[in-house]
Amino acid sequence: AREPVANLPRQGRRRVALARALASRRPLLVVDGELDPTLWALLPGLLEQAPGVESVLLATATAGDRAWAADTVALVSGERLVAQAPLAELVDSTDPEVRSVLSWVSR
């Protein structure tokens, strides 16, 4: 508690950012990148106790387990939204642009 946030290791800074986001009582929680496994395990319980948080946006460049479990995945290329659907539907797409963005996904 006495240590300045800037002096904390990366995971410590992410934990502080998550705590601040949950305390802000906004309807959307934005998570930029992966959190450590301990935080991911705690997140569902924290969200149940966070009044007003209706959605969580995870910005990541990899399709891990969380992407497969997400209600909706948005594919972005450059500054443009290419497609939005559950990842299983996107993976089955024959659209060349969707296929190009999904080149990093494996089943």
Image (cartoon, helix red, strand yellow):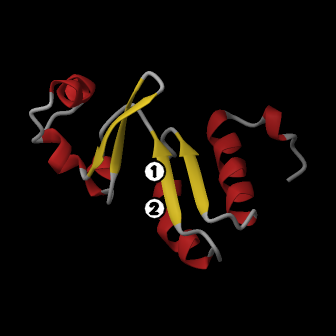
Tell me where residue 19 sits by quadrant: bottom right
Q: Which mark is residue 41?
A: 2
Q: Position of residue 61 (x, y in %)?
A: 39, 31
Query: Label 1: which residue?
Result: 37
Which residue lies at the image location 51% right of the left edge and 45% below the top edge? Answer: 35
**Identity of the amino acid at label 2?**
Ala
Label 2, residues with CA under 10 Å away: few <14, some 14-19, many ≥20: few
Tell me where residue 22 sits by quadrant: bottom right
The image shows residue 93, relative to residue 88, as above or below, that is above
Which residue lies at the image location 69% right of the left edge and 34% below the top edge? Answer: 9
State left or right for residue 18 relative to residue 61: right
Q: Nearer the viewer, residue 27 or 65?
A: 27
Quarter of the image for the C terminus: give it: top left
**Identity of the amino acid at label 1?**
Pro
State left or right for residue 2 relative to residue 53: right
**Marks 1 and 2 close (CB-CB < 8 Å):** yes
